[in-house]
Amino acid sequence: MTLSTGLPQGAVPRLERPGPLRDRVYEALLELITTRALKPGQHLVESELAGHLGVSRQPVREALQRLSTEGWVDLRPAQGAFVHEPTEEEADQLLTVRTLLEAEAARLAAANAGAAAIGALEDLCAEGERAVAADDVDAAVATNARLHAKVMELAGNTVLAELAAQVDRRVRWYYTPVARQRGRQSWTEHRELIAAIAERDEQRATDVMRAHTEHTRQMYHDREK
Amino acid sequence: MTLSTGLPQGAVPRLERPGPLRDRVYEALLELITTRALKPGQHLVESELAGHLGVSRQPVREALQRLSTEGWVDLRPAQGAFVHEPTEEEADQLLTVRTLLEAEAARLAAANAGAAAIGALEDLCAEGERAVAADDVDAAVATNARLHAKVMELAGNTVLAELAAQVDRRVRWYYTPVARQRGRQSWTEHRELIAAIAERDEQRATDVMRAHTEHTRQMYHDREK
DNA sequence: CAATTGTCTTTCGCCTACAGTCTACGGCGC
DNA sequence: GCGCCGTAGACTGTAGGCGAAAGACAATTG
């Protein structure tokens, strides 16, 4: 389809605006937290962050509040923001929820997936296996995230996807030390999941995904032994 | 136990502070939205709201952003906040997620519940049945919410509870016209649920809760026919 | 020496002011 | 009469400032 100008639809890159400052601050802070540059329990002072990022306090405040609602920081009244400190119990609860959401996504994906989608999944899986074979842990982790995201996309449930995205991100934060260790087995499980989806076997897809995330939990509990 | 002043511990009601202004604005706006005083699609102008509530724009902005992350309003850049407009598809997706979360809560509740807790559930159920018998729809709806909240509490998973609370609230918003109609059958299902929990039958508790919320969905789809 | 109290610093919560951007409307040319 | 452009208004986005509450520390008193 073309516009009245004769230009193809997506040709003009909509001249990217910097976008709302608060969003960029949000992403910057989230990056700092997930990378452990800001440590759990640390007191985040608005004026410091503002100065450090070269903006005013207002966008920082708004970013912090959003981070608070999403569970990344705790906002103690009249005292400020502190990077949230994960507890054993919370990590476990998060993983329970994640298992639930991902399993449902797998089920829906199995119900909805078309041939093209399954091909895309297999491509991602192959990419991940290559990364593992090459001992490129970062690439493997990244591809893992993309694979799960793709499954979620195939589920076709926006609400579910948004919840899962948040939960997933936090789970990854808690479990980063663990995740790096269990690269290999993870991908054989992925293969099985894709097979189940390809066969449109909802029950099996659910079970496989449930087992998959449960393995992560087991790994976590066995971690420092 | 007494303090050195001789005052009993809980006697001083900790003199409740008005709490952060942004939170009160948040609750006020949420109330206005859920009661339909602010209609879906309506443009919310910060300065208007601020003037109307007798505060400055800042707390209003912060409240709006929080409402945005929780899906109550849509925040279009450089244009402002608009009350979110529910779609068929979204309502359905939300209900799917709710089913999922509530079913899991029921399962966990069945696994954890003690005798005292089950008694509390039965009390709530009786209260609800009385409300239905008296045709007090508002009380029945309120008790319904408390019952579900109690089950969620028994599940003992904070993360799950928080997610469910948000989803539940939005579902109630979408389905308020429907919910009022299906008072009676709802409570017989509640009885069944409590029985399953009392017997610590996780599978049955899950199934009952799933069927329970699924009935709500059916009712919704049949609504305007 | 311990408990308490007064003060002091730090930081937040909120308000006001200014700049940027989008929308709507009226005038102008075709 | 129709469409385009320019301008004005309105609202949001960002910045900076003031008052107040919470915590820390030291001086004081029993």
Image (cartoon, coloured by chain):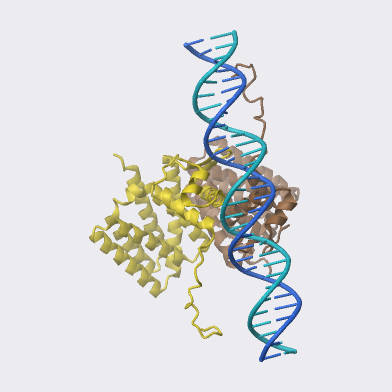
Chain colours: A yellow, B brown, C blue, D cyan
Seen at 37% across and 51% down, the residue is A214
Residue A71 visible in the shown view: no
Above or below B173: residue A94: above
Q: Looking at the rendering, which quadrant does residue B185 occupy?
A: bottom right
* Picture coordinates of residue B98, whole percent (x, y): 55, 55
| The C terminus of chain A lies in quadrant | top left
Seen at 42% across and 50% down, the residue is A32
Is residue B170 rendered to the left or right of residue A222? right
Viewer-closest of B126 and D13? D13
Above or below B36: residue B205: above
Residue A142 visible in the shown view: yes
The tally of labels here is 0
* Picture coordinates of residue B219, whole percent (x, y): 64, 62
* Picture coordinates of residue A219, whole percent (x, y): 32, 47
* Picture coordinates of residue D30, whole percent (x, y): 59, 8
Viewer-closest of B91 and A16? A16
Viewer-closest of A223 and A3? A3
Is residue A152 rendered to the left or right of residue B162? left
